[in-house]
């Protein structure tokens, strides 16, 4: 549901806990903030070991999104250690294909 937020004046649509399956079968969940107006927008990815729904992440994502960015906020910790990969730092590089984004 679009809501008017942020300093940029664009209406923002938020999708919470959007799943993405990794090669090892792990499901990662992210909150995606999109401008409600159709168009191509640059994508910003924020990865954190903390709760992605804290006020500081939500407010920053809303402000950036209302200024013309798609913002993906992802909490990689999820409250449990990575038992499959104990030395895993949680740092990954992603290539984002923006041509398929509205």
Image (spheres, grey):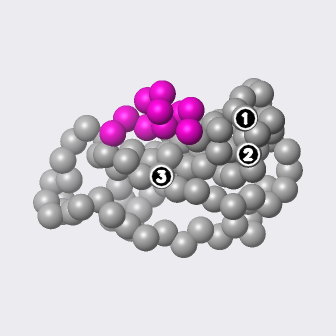
Q: Quadrant of residue 58?
A: top right
Q: Which mark is residue 7?
A: 1
Q: Secondary structure at mark 1?
A: loop
Q: Is residue 15 above or below residue 4?
A: below
Confirm or deny contact between disc 1 and disc 2 (CB under 8 A): yes
> Disc 2 designates what residue?
67
Q: Which mark is residue 46?
A: 3
Query: Taking 3 as reference, is 17 left or right?
Result: left
Q: Earlier in the sequence, mark 2 or mark 3?
A: 3
- Residue ID at (54%, 72%): 95
Counting other residues with Cα less than 10 Å from the Cα at mark 1, is it few (<14), some (14-19), or many (20 or more)? few
Query: Taking 51 as reference, is 61 left or right?
Result: right
Residue 61 image point, x, y percent = 58, 41
Q: Quadrant of residue 22?
A: bottom left
Residue 24 image point, x, y percent = 33, 64
User: 82 or 60, which lies in front?
Assistant: 60
Q: Earlier in the sequence, mark 1 or mark 2?
A: 1
Give the spatial CA distance, label 1 vs label 2: 7 Å
Query: Taking 4 as reference, is 24 left or right?
Result: left
Residue 71 image point, x, y percent = 60, 49
Magenta-tinted stretch: 50-60
Confirm or deny contact between disc 2 and disc 3 (CB under 8 A): no
Which numbered disc, 2 or 3, marks the residue closer to the eye?
2
Q: Earlier in the sequence, mark 1 or mark 3?
A: 1
- Residue ID at (58%, 56%): 44
Is residue 1 in view from this perspective?
no
The C terminus: image quadrant: bottom right
Extreme residue in the front direction = 7
Counting other residues with Cα less than 10 Å from the Cα at mark 3, is it few (<14), some (14-19), or many (20 or more)? some
Is residue 70 in view from this perspective?
yes
Q: Is 38 part of what is drawn in magenta?
A: no
Counting other residues with Cα less than 10 Å from the Cα at mark 2, is it few (<14), some (14-19), or many (20 or more)? some
């Amino acid at each position: 549901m679009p809501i008017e937020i942020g300093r940029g004046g664009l209406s923002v649509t938020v999708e919470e806990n959007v799943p993405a399956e990794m090669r090892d079968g792990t499901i990662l969940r992210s909150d995606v903030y999109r401008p409600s107006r159709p168009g191509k927008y640059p994508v910003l990815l924020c990865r954190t070991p903390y709760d992605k729904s804290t006020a500081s992440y939500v407010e920053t994502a809303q402000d950036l999104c209302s200024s013309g960015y798609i913002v993906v906020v992802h909490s990689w910790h999820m409250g449990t250690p990575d038992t499959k990969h104990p030395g895993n730092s949680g740092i990954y590089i992603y290539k984002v294909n923006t041509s398929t984004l509205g």
